[in-house]
Amino acid sequence: MKKVGILGLGKYIPEKILTNADLEKMVDTSDEWITTRTGIKERHIAAQNEATSDLAAKAAKEALKAASLKAAELDLIIVATVTPDMPFPSTATIVQAKLGAKNAFCFDISAACAGYIYGITIAQQFIARGTCKNALVIGAETLSRITDWQDRNTCVLFGDGAGAAVLGESKGQGILSAYLGSDGTKTALLHMPGGGSLNPATAQTVKDRLHYIKMEGSELFKIAVTSMADAALMALKSAGLKCADVNWIIPHQANLRIINAVAKRLGFVNAQVYLNIEKYGNMSSACVAIALCEAAEQGKIKKGDIVLLDAFGGGLVWGALIIKW
């Protein structure tokens, strides 16, 4: 089994910014209400001509440059998203074409906000077993396309963006462990009911606004805190580590109160929590990907640091990943 590490990171954030002040003009809400309950001040929205694959490809190019690799050297591309360009083909194959990564096999995964962690864990298996040498994992979302801008409880939460990582064999540092979990009995707490085989698109499903995100926020809060904390402990145990060994936590940026509750439950004393929720909001699978990239770019993560990625999302799904930098 080969040791697998991150060779390069990249991100892409759309230019358009939607502030809380802007939302005050759209729905019955306020900057104070949004900030107090979520920690979000603004979010970025993809341009009309930007699809998820466009965001993903731009983030991927940054990651390839950071890894000093050419697209043709990639053996695998995984795109984690709940907002694909279309039901099929996979967004990963569209990204492949945009990059010119002709030697890579490609597929999408749908694991909502935990998608990036799921994707890295999957790619690690291929590389560790020698099936491929270099893999590209992207978390990319255009959640603005499935956000109900008439629902004040959900439209304040979401934004668009993409983050990418190039993985390959590592001599020393790298991925130490991962823990993934799911609970399909609670799918109704966070889902988009329209557009699939259960509720195919019709005039009625559009009228009933079934093609937008539906969420039961209050019920999700406690589950998210418990699931993220438990996943972190399981991943640390698998790596033979304790909370005191962690230097940086890169959590899913869904809600500041959830993040603080997870950190408190785990009793992190020495670890620092990386936050960017204020300027981006919840970007589902792109959250952890972009946060990790930013933390590395800003020089916050040092060589030898233990980094914990932790996320929770619709499915329900959750996951934690431990990396030695």
Image (tube, rainbow, N blue to C red):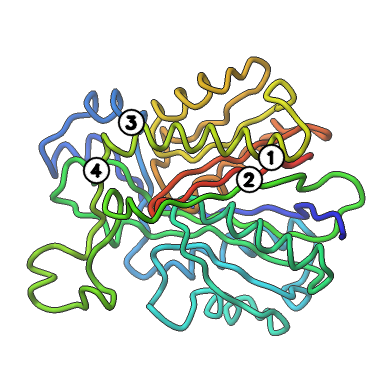
Q: Are marks 1 and 4 in contact (CB under 8 Å)?
A: no
- Mark 3 vs mark 4, CA separation in Å: 15 Å
Q: Residue furthest top?
A: 269
- Mark 1 vs mark 3, CA separation in Å: 25 Å
Q: Secondary structure at mark 2?
A: helix
- Residue 38: percent from left, percent from top: 33, 31
Q: Secondary structure at mark 1?
A: helix
Q: Which mark is residue 216?
A: 4
Q: Are marks 1 and 2 in contact (CB under 8 Å)?
A: yes
- Mark 1 vs mark 4, CA separation in Å: 34 Å
Residue assigned mark 2: 293
Quadrant of the snapshot with the N terminus:
bottom right
The mark lying in front, picked from 3 and 4, is 4
Quadrant of the snapshot with the C terminus:
top right
The mark lying in front, picked from 2 and 3, is 3
Q: Earlier in the sequence, mark 2 or mark 4?
A: 4
Residue assigned mark 1: 296
Q: Secondary structure at mark 4?
A: loop
- Mark 1 vs mark 2, CA separation in Å: 5 Å
Give whichever of 181, 83 is nearer the camera.
181
Residue at 72% in and 45% down: 177
Residue at 63% in and 54% down: 10
- Residue 291: percent from left, percent from top: 56, 41
- Residue 207: percent from left, percent from top: 7, 68
Q: Earlier in the sequence, mark 2 or mark 3?
A: 3
Mark 1: amino acid? Ala
Mark 2: amino acid? Cys
Q: Quadrant of residue 39?
A: top left
Residue assigned mark 3: 38
